[in-house]
Amino acid sequence: MQAALLLPARPSAAAPPTLLRPGAASASSARAPTPLLARRLSGGVLSAVRRLTVAAAGSSSSSSGPLYPTPPPTEQDIERAKFEQVVKRLGKTARYFKNLGTLGFWSQLVSTVVSAGILSFSTVITGKVTAPFTFYATAAGIAAGFISVFWSFGYIRLSERLRKTASEPAKAPPRADVIRSLKNGIVLNMLGMGAAVLGMQATVGALVAKALTTSAVPYYQATSPGQSPVLALDVFLVQASANIILSHFLGLASSLELLRSVAIPPAEAAAA
């Protein structure tokens, strides 16, 4: 036993050396990462997971709503919103009055001037008023047409006042006065149209009577002193009445549309 302990130990059999190719050595070294590289990889994975967690938390908070609720609007904010709404509506009304007032002014002016020229021409050519009721009814319609023209010009001036006072609603003309002016214009157009319609009906009735009495007389016989043939000027008066009716219709349509735009409640106007 002691002899065995005193004897030197035999050298262990060494493993035979293996010959490796350079490529295999590099591959084996690549497959076995170093501890530093492993720590870097784990750190990158952890940072990516952390970023994903923060992004998911942000998206969930944004979808669920703000972390701090907005405070309720104060009285100043409410008054400012009402003021902006009034200013916006005044500007829109001013533009509407200007457009429709200009359209009504020029259309009525042209139609009324043409009707007045036709009536004057027929009176000057004949030298007398052949049908007094027709003449005076048409003349009344023409006079109402000229008044309506100046009334439409008043709408244009009213639009300028509304535009200048849009930033100061307290200085704007009262809504009741605007509605009353529009209603007066509507009544004026209705009266003028009624007078023109009566004059046109009288003219057409006189033309029909003349045509019937003239057709009963043979063409080779002279007309009796009490009969008057149908003249071209009589038909011309129908054109004058039709033009003045058209003038009053255009004025009535523009006034009604302006009245509708002014009479809209504020809630409906804001929604529109």
Image: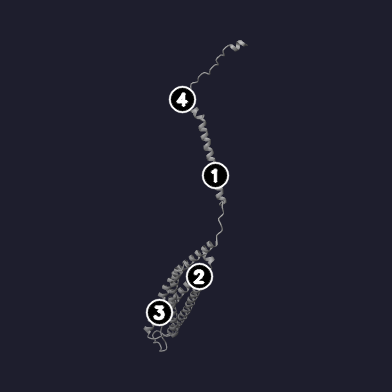
**What secondary structure is found at the residue carrying circle 3?**
helix
Q: Which residue is mark 1?
A: 54
Q: Counting residues from the N terminus, which is met first, the one under dot 4 or under dot 1?
A: 4
Q: Which residue is mark 3?
A: 116
Q: Quadrant of residue 246?
A: bottom left
- What residue occupies the far top of the structure in this picture? 3
Q: Which residue is mark 4?
A: 22
Q: Amino acid at mark 2?
A: Val
**Residue at horizontal 51 percent and vertical 32 percent from the top:** 36
Are the two marked residues, 1 and 2, in contact with CB atoms closer than 8 angstroms?
A: no
Q: Quadrant of residue 3?
A: top right
Within 10 Å of the Cα at label 3, are there few (<14), some (14-19), or many (20+) other Cα atoms?
many
**Height in image: 223 above or below 267?**
below
Q: Counting residues from the N terminus, which is met first, the one under dot 1 or under dot 2?
A: 1
Of tags 1 and 2, which is closer to the observer?
A: 1
**What secondary structure is found at the residue carrying circle 2?**
helix
